[in-house]
Image (cartoon, grey):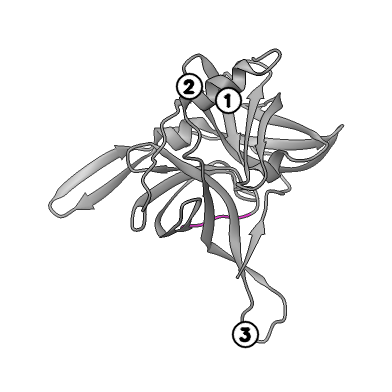
Amino acid sequence: MFWFLFFLSCMITVEGEADKLAVTLETGETTKAISVRSPLKSSAKVVIFNEDEFLGHGSGNYFKSGKYKFVLTAAHVLKHKFSSFILDGEELVKLKTIYINNQRDIAIAVPEKELENIKATKFRVNRDVDLVGKTIYYAGFPKDMEKSLFRGFVSRSTSEWIMIQSFALPGSSGAVVFDFWGRAIGLISAVKLGVFGFSPYPELVETAVVVQKFDFIDHDFIRELFENENDPL
């Protein structure tokens, strides 16, 4: 089984009015309208530049924990020698990486100033061990698309990652996946690669998406991370 880590894309696009959407689910005779503001309002595009040359982008989400605000994204989106920014409306705000976990493909970064167009959502984590069958949501920036909302369900769950049946493309990496109640579960890390028919070349299976859990990150973890910084923002 092969998995493809991805984040490169070829366009910068400005977010639309997607945070006004809502999702309606039907359970038997009871219809429940749920808010999808957690993934939508906090969704952010992480843009990579080499001086003035645009190299690509990933996704991420903006959170707050107590007095601290930070961006969660994939480690492979930020692990490079180039400059990383958040696209805040039409402004690029530089990011400072304060945590990288290569094994779990998780990174935490801090914008150099307060964001005006992206709203930090309260950091709450779903720490359930078995998530199979649960409905999930995420908002991200797949290749050549503006910010979009996706829904799926968990098809496999381990102690460190889950596989979801949803949709992802290059540019989706780092987008945080939320449960029905707006709690964060993990972030998009990879999609499956498969070989089909007579072609010797692997192809993306965009509907089989690997999500890395970050249930080890809590409020104490964030506080200690910032306190150990020389000049936390």
**Other-residue count near label 1 (Cα within 10 Å), few / some / many at <14 / 14–19 / ≥20:** many
Amino acid type, residue under disc 2 in the picture: Ser
Q: Which residues lie in the magenta part? A: 165-169
Where residue 222 appears, x then y in whole percent?
A: 54, 24
Q: Main secondary structure of the magenta part?
A: loop
In the current view of this chain or complex, which residue is farthest to the left?
Answer: 29
Q: Residue at x 15, y 47 (%)?
A: 30
Secondary element at image label 1: strand
**Other-residue count near label 2 (Cα within 10 Å), few / some / many at <14 / 14–19 / ≥20:** some
N-terminal of the two: label 1 or label 2? 2
Where residue 173 appears, x then y in whole percent?
A: 61, 47
Residue under numbered circle 1:
70
Amino acid type, residue under disc 3 in the picture: Gly
**The C terminus lies in quadrant:** top right
In the current view of this chain or complex, which residue is farthest to the bottom?
Answer: 198
- Residues at discs 1 and 2 in contact (Cβ within 8 Å): yes
Where residue 198 appears, x then y in whole percent?
A: 67, 87
Residue under numbered circle 2:
65
N-terminal of the two: label 3 or label 2? 2
* Residue 117 visible within the image: no
Which quarter of the figure has residue 88?
top right
- Residue in front for this viewpoint, 141 or 68: 68
Estimate the spatial distance between the alpha carbons at disc 1 and disc 2, rounded to whole Å: 8 Å
Q: Residue at x 28, y 45 (%)?
A: 24
Secondary element at image label 2: strand
Identify the mark at residue 10; answer none if there is no mark. none
Vertical order, 178 against 70 (above or below): below
Residue under numbered circle 3:
197
